[in-house]
Image (cartoon, rainbow, N blue to C red):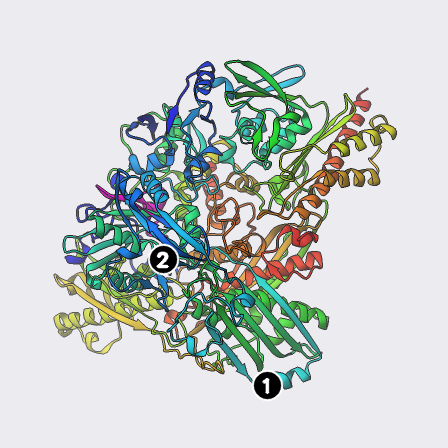
Amino acid sequence: MRVNFTVNGRPQEADDVWEGESLLYVLRERLGLPGSKNACEQGECGSCTVRLDGVPVCSCLVAAGQAEGREVVTVEGLADYARQRSWGAAPGAPLDSPSGEGTDSLTGEGAELAPIQQAFIDAGAVQCGFCTPGLLVAADEMLEHNPDPSDADIREALSGNLCRCTGYEKIMDAVRLAAARQSEGV
Amino acid sequence: MESVRPPKSPGFQGTSPVLARGGAPNGVPTKVTQGSQTKGGIGESTLRPDGTLKVTGEFAYSSDLWHEDMLWGQILRSPVAHAEIVSIDTSEALALPGVYAVMTYDDLPTDVKHYGLEIQDTPVLAHGKVRHHGEPVAIVAADHPETARRAAAKIKVDYRELPVVTDEKSATAPDAILVHENRDDHHIGHVSHPNIVHRQPIVRGDADAAAARADVIVKGEYYFGMQDQAFLGPESGLAVPEEDGGVHLYIATQWLHSDLRQIAPVLGLPEKKVRMTLAGVGGAFGGREDLSMQIHACLLALRTGKPVKIVYNRFESFFGHVHRHPARLYYEHGATRDGKLTHVRCRIVLDGGAYASASPAVVGNASSLGIGPYVVDDVEIEAIALYTNNPPCGAMRGFGAVQACFAYEAQMDKVAGELGLDPVEFRRRNAMEQGTIMPTGQPVDSPAPVAELLRRVKAMPLPPERQWESSEGADVRQLPGGLSNTTHGEGVVRGVGYAVGIKNVGFSEGFDDYSTAKVRMEVVAGQPVATVHTAMAEVGQGGVTVHAQIARTELGVTQVTIHPADTQVGSAGSTSASRQTYVTGGAVKNACELVREKVLALGRRQFGSYHPAWATAELLLEGGKVVTDGGEVLADLVDVLGDEAVEIEAEWRHRATEPFDLRTGQGNGHVQYSFAAHRAVVEVDTELGLVKVVELACAQDVGKALNPLSVVGQIQGGTTQGLGIAVMEEIIVDPVTAKVRNPSFTDYLIPTILDTPTIPVDVLELADDHAPYGLRGIGEAPTLSSTPAVLAAIRNATGLELNRTPVRPEHLTGNA
Amino acid sequence: MDFLRPASWEEALAAKAAHPTAVPIAGGTDVMVEINFDHRRPDHLLDLGRVAELGEWEVGEESVRLGASVPYSRIMEHLRAELPGLALASHTVASPQIRNRGGVGGNLGTASPAGDAHPALLAAGAEVEAVSVRGTRLIPIDDFYTGVKRNALAPDELIRAVHVQKADGPQQYSKVGTRNAMVIAVCAFGLALHPETRTVRTGIGSAAPTPIRARIAEEFLNSALEEGGFWDNGKIVTPSVAKQFADLCAAACNPIDDVRGTASYRRHAVGVMARRTLTWTWESYRGARHTTEGAA
């Protein structure tokens, strides 16, 4: 079947989609967006978290056909999404100048990052990094609604995202850091 | 300019046909440009060079690779634990449109049909027999994963089930069915039964005589459950056939060269025709020491002439790698009234499952570290690993030492209780220190601050009581049961527990544990640039960060390029055993020093006549210049190097170790020890048996923190894996069928952020003079003491004995 | 496999009538797991995601008509006053991501004894609105669960909504899992006080082949509360009554040993949760009574 939906503000079309394919599979294998990770395929790890019409969901549990006509934001679009939010622009509108241009192809340096992305790097919240994309999408969404979260709020909001490397402490630091920078307007 | 050209790797556009879709560069290798002068050297918390790629989703993990025209591989696995394979019929699978190849044992190209880390006992595909649930039987390549799955389902395998052996009693019975007939490995000569992989006794002093002096003797039997590494990035990789008849494998592994050594003979290819490049690795923790899909992907690629990608799903991942050995441990401790240990006797039975994997090394660690970081002159230790029909077990963070620590620390608490002593004080009185002789006869010849680490965790302020209370009532998120709303404070009792452990660093027992580094220095765009090329597997631990720091420190440059890890450079050894910063870090340091000598020689040749210091002073490379140790600048590196590139590839070894004597266990088997201590604070809902770990404080001696931020991250991560095995993680194997009952993230639970407490870390830096920069391997030690500290805290809260881990609610309520 | 995408409820019913084996998919949190792991290959997937009314709810005089696909996160946010037990249960469902997708219709359709919503629905009192091209019927929740992962739906029926009685008194919900978040129930317990009818209802999950009520325990407690005049005097429920209630709730269970827990533990834990939730709801009832009296 054919599926049309919007990813990171751009219309996308996938053809010859097998009906049992998940949104995650289509993003990763058909649309060249492997940032959302496949770690459990049963909604138990959060590595595949994307925003579907603004709401964080496990993309492994969304049938590809269910995404028809919907708006999806993945980690690849997180920086643009955050930038639009800070400008107060309508979310999902395509951007004239996407981030990523002029980026160092070896390290990604020069890429414009969302505050939560920068905070994850600065706080040492990234080790193997496989859980990182899902955590970033979930954490960014939490800070959107709750700019001054308590530790318990952070833990609850991120309780659907497993990390095996860090013991979560540096992830807590990263979210606190992003919240603090956000409140300082940095 | 050879080395600054984008190296061949899955992500470097223009040089390789393999690209992550979306044109993203592969993330493993990376150029580091942060800092100025020699800023960013060792001791600083420089940030990960791959961090940006990892937060933008552009870092190419092994499962993200993509190739034009690529096929998907699928493995058919045994649904039973032990059976003869009467027949296999692949005809229906082959007939399915979209299927390119179906292969079984009979299709293997050479006489080499087995592999293994130490003992080559593991069939590439099952031959006549399967020995454990989930063993690979056949492989399929097809144009879509669903086609491959459907084809695998159409392969007809006729199994005739055999009885299973699942524990010591059934496996070592005189008439036990043999897991491996006709063993000819080097351990068979010293084991009492063919279903025992390896046995290591350690005898020192006279335990009988010492026991006679004991005022108290405490015996205990313990069980340690089977833990899964549960790395989040499942096994995956891409094999691309090459024009010369060889194959290029892009793979997530812990040791490229060990994989290569095992893969090439099965393919019938010389090693140079099997090129391997490290793809992004989504965690490892020991679970990628053994091969998983490597050979299968290569076989299918060579058979079909097309690139083949294999990605396990989570279910398959539980069968696709070895687990931590479950263990039964029998201990006897004696002590005098004044709190000194008289003797320890212990017997550690590790279940290795169907194939050997790392079992011999696990036995070596469990036995040699079996009594913990204590001074005991009279010991009798025996450790064995079994062959059974349970899932194969092998490497996981802290192996052997983790299981033993759980038991000996429980014993230490029991003895302290018998003596009426505080558990920390009792440990202090028996704590090992520098100069202590291990049960193996090996002196501990670097700092061993066991008592100090315990003192430090004990001195940390305790977290406030009843933190769940708020003006709006109980915050269930801070209570046992969490969001499930099981208590508002009822039945909740706090407990505190302590533990300390000892882990060896590096490969022991005479293994030639070396690493290789190639370092190049040249001028690029007017700047001196160093390139570091090793085969070290970056699995998340931060080796790439540290290598760049070492190069900056040693070569005085700011720009360091980390070349992708591949087999075009010599072996780096495994990213395991807490060894990479020590050994490959040491190799990078060594290669940098050799490069520095050559650079200085270049400088002397060109500029030596201009300044006497070239001949007389100690010269350094700092801030892109050659300077004297007094700080006088002699030349710019740019001028010294000119158009020349200085490059050195060199192996580096830590001091040699020796095997343990097979009868007495004596021998200088280890190169370094690593110590950590934990204090756990728990709150237990004693009625429901639910546990909330409130805080898990750690103190660890790291020798020298090359990157303090990464060090703390390692300690917190290791601590949390220890917490997991304490209260929730266990692969449950049916004792009758030997089948795995919970191969999913629904039923194999690892800690969420709501299960994980604050983890304050106190880092001690007492240099080990034998090691580069005085550093100590750090990755594993925190996983040892975390588990027994949590168990001790739960015992403290409940008064229960608790002789197994993980402890489940039914164990705390008497409903097991 | 065919993917059916009805644009309206009528189209969905027609599709289900034409393909009775079609598997409805809404939040996907059960169905997609089965597809991802090759446990299920239905001929047709029937996507209900386009049927807007399934995601809506109406608060009536007596009950809330809760659309089958209303996500748990919305129940938590918007129906805490009307459906406190279900809101608490919703908060224990899996993870935030799952709560954003899953709804009560999925729990009912799957009818797993471990579904988190069931004990709350049983305790509150509910009817399942089952609809087919043949018409609509309301199935009392007590008659809905017919076996392990089986329910009273006919092959051509879809769940349109569940009608849950609005709370007329305090409700509580507890669930035991071996992790503090994102966990499938080892067992779960829901309790609702119904002061208007002076009755108590219970619901038990994961402790029998189907979700059940502890009817004997309810009857015992109903008469004990009545005889002691507790509804009127607002006294603390005596410990012996609470214990007897807890024991009867435990006795109502018919659990199994599995990888998540032992039968013995499940019985024990249901008893503990029964006692605690009774205490919490009764305290809340007494508190509300005092407030009311104070105001009057």
Whole-angstrom CA distance, mark 2 to mark 1, is 48 Å
Q: Residue at x 56, y 60 (%)?
A: B787
- Quadrant of the image occupied by residue B252: bottom left
Quadrant the C terminus of chain A occupies: top left
Mark on residue B206? 1
Judging depth in this view, the residue of A93 and B738 nearest the camera is B738
Mark on residue B126? 2
Q: Is residue B57 magenta?
A: yes
Q: Residues within 10 Å of mark 1 (few under 14, many from 20)?
A: few
Read off the magenta span.
B47-74
Write down the chain letter for disc 2: B
Q: Amino acid at mark 2?
A: Ala
Q: Amino acid at mark 1?
A: Asp
Q: Is residue C102 magenta?
A: no
Of the residues tagged 2 and 1, which is closer to the observer? 2
Q: Position of residue B680 (x, y in %)?
A: 60, 58
SS at mark 2 in the image: loop
- State left or right for residue C113 relative to residue B200: right
- State left or right for residue C274 relative to residue B505: right
